[in-house]
Each structure stands twice: as C-alpha cells, then as structure tokens.
Image (cartoon, helix red, strand yellow):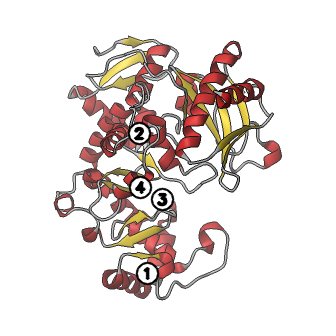
Amino acid sequence: MKPGASITAREARRLAIAAQGLARPRPSTATPKQLRSALSTINVLQLDAINVLERTQFVVPFSRIGGYDVAHLHAMTGPGGWLHEGWAHAASLVPVDQEPLFRWRQQLRAEYGDSPTYAPRWRAFREENADYFAAILAEVTERGPLAASQLTDPRRQDGDWWERRSHGRRVLEFLFATGELAAWRTPNFERVYDLPERVVPAEVLARPTPAVEEAHRELLVLAARSSGVATLRDLAGYHMIKPRAAAPRLDELVDAGHLLPVSVDGWREPAYVVPSVRVSTPTRTNATFLSPFDSLVWNRDRTRRIFGFDYRIEVYVPPLKREYGYYVLPVLLGDELVGRVDLKADRKASTLRVQAAYVEAEPRVIEVAAAVATELDALRAWLRLDTVAVARRGDLAPALKRAVTAASRD
C-alpha cells in the first residue's frame, strides 16, 4: 500500500478482520502450532475471570481456530513457557520474548504505582510494610512458586473490592506489577507467583532493557500489524500506551517507513498501516462469536467506527437496565457484525443457553440465524455440552430457535 492511500470503510473492516486472524476458514483440526500462530497474530490475549460461558482467554483462540484443547494453552504459560503474563492490555498474555518491551511499565509502577496520583499512597504502603515486603520475597524465594492463599502470613482483612484482599495478596500484586516477581495462572485462574529467573527464560531476562522510546516504537508496530488499519489512539490503546507518549514515536515510525499514513472514508483522524498490508475479501463462511474482551472489539469507539456497531458489556449493569443481556458476544459474519447473542454454559444441565439473540441486519435474519445455529453447535461441542437451548428474548430468537431445532434433526 502507498503512503496517503485512501481506504473505503469496507476495506478498513476487511483489513481489521484479516489482521486479527478471522478472515480465513478455521483449520479442520486445531493443533498447538495453529494455536501459537493465532496468538502471534493478535499478539495480546487479555485475561478475565468471568466464567459464565468460558473465560475470554479461551474463547478468543476458539474464535480463530475452533475446537482446540485448552490444555495446550495452559502448557504455553508458566515457567519457561512461550507466553508471559503481564500488564500489556490490562492483565494479558504476550509472547515471552516481548518481556523486555514492558519493563518500562514495571519501572513506572515501581515509582508511581497505578498512577502518579496514587504515588504517595503507593510509596507509603511499601515503606510502612517494608519488613513484610521483604518477608514475602524471602518466602517466595525459599518456597515458591506460591499463590496468595499459600502464604504463611497472608494478613487477611475486611473491606470492599481491592481492600478486601489480604495484605499478602496486595504485596504479591505490587511485586508482580513492578517485575520483582513473575506470575502465571492455574486452571482455576488463581495467580501463582515466583522469581522472574525461575519463570522467564534466561536468554530473555539477559536482554538489555530498551529505552522507553524504543519499546514504544516496537509496540506500536506490533499493534499496527494486529490492527490492520488504525488511528493513533487505536495503536496506543492496544498496549495501553498514553496517546501523548505515542504520538512522537508514531511520527518517527512514519519517517522511517515502518508505518504508512492513509485515510479512511468516514474517519476523522488519520490512520496508519504497515507497508506490507493488502486488502483481501474474507473467505470464512461460518459465523464467529467474539468475546467481549476480544482484541477485535475491545476498543468500543473503534468497533463503532469500523463496524457501525454500538457495543458494551453489561455485566456490571443492573439486570433491569440491561439492553441485551449479561454476557453478550457480537457475531461476525463475512466482514460485518450481524448480531449479538447472550450466552451461558449451564454445566449442570449440560446445555449451552442462548438467553437472548438479536440481529443487526433484519433482511438477513434467516441467513444469520442459520449461521449462528451452526456456530452454536460448534461451541457446544467444544465446551462438551449436550444441547443448545434458545430463549425467546430478542428479534433473532424465533428464527434462531427454528434453525437450532432443524439442525438437531439432521
């Protein structure tokens, strides 16, 4: 693509979908190699504890390669693993060889905590509990790896949300955020902590820490590859870099020819692509469910701009005020988001429950219902559930119920 090229809105959608590994048909068999390739494509796999359907870190690969073995993903994490947990886009997994690119954030957190606003509280907490910090580090060194629940002296406390966590858990989290400890997750999502030298490969830890500016440049290029086409704010947000800090680095990347400026019809801000990007028509014919934390849609403004799709997760919205449902997944078909489904895995009843289903393109309701029914069956099989049940809520529900019933008879 040439600098200054003009891209249509549809071409922008197609670039975004392809860059996220969602444009081609799924493989007939999902292997560890294909799982690794899918994760390399998106570069950042966000973690989240919500398990009403399946945790997002497992749904995102399913969206790309289909019914893979979750054990393969677990095997990629932990000591010596290919994936490394850190604060990339919220709590996330990234390829472990990128660990040096996030040391600047650990250094900032060591000085400021979550933000300069809370820096005095952060420093005061560490100073007031210096002996306890030292004791925790000593215990992990001697006994590690350890979860917070395994500490000899967790110092439990009462409170709300973060404040209800034990002092031990808070200290472990601080040490993880600053890079003094590394961590990974157990199958039940509990974080386990250990010394970085016992988790991150020695050759990665030995690499020099890049300057903040260099790390930002590399992360912005990675974000551009995984985004297809993106604005400054899109690129900065992919790895949670402040736009003000990203702007001069973006100019440097353009001057060096690593990124190209383009314009997209309907976008108010300039956009950027990697030089090698090419627009192609998606060849995937099945519908694809997208987790609320999928990197294609986690930026709600970008999702609205690219797909004309207003989306928010309503987990924290009171039930009577929810518009679409508790855990709603957008439905991708071709190069459009054509609907949304509120899903729940009822494991006791071995049933995948569609608690609500909505269509974005009313004239395509029969087509969308058929595609969603097929994807529901694939998801049901991957989750090892026996049946699919469709509730009446939503304008797609009647057609979807008929499609699911018809598919079950075949």
Check the image and report above or below for 49 versus 302: below
Residue linked to disc 3: 115
Q: Amino acid at mark 3?
A: Ser
Separation of residues labelled 3 and 2 (CA atoms): 17 Å
Of tags 4 and 1, the one toward the viewer is 4
Q: Quadrant of residue 164?
A: bottom right
Quarter holding the C terminus? top right
Q: Nearer the viewer, residue 154 or 7?
A: 154
Which secondary structure lies at badge 3? loop
Please give the label number shown on residue 127.
Answer: 1
| Residue at image location 43% in from the left, 81% down from the top | 127
Q: Position of residue 318 (x, y in %)?
A: 78, 49
In the shown orientation, is residue 325 left or right of residue 87?
right
In the shown orientation, is residue 302 left or right of residue 273?
right
Between discs 4 and 1, the one toward the N terminus: 4
Residue linked to disc 2: 236
Q: Nearer the viewer, residue 109 or 295?
A: 295
| Residue at image location 51% in from the left, 61% down from the top | 117
Separation of residues labelled 1 and 2 (CA atoms): 33 Å
> Crowding at label 3, few (<14), some or many (≥20) Cα neighbours within 10 Å?
few
Residue linked to disc 4: 71
Separation of residues labelled 4 and 1 (CA atoms): 41 Å
Check the image and report above or below for 70 versus 133: above
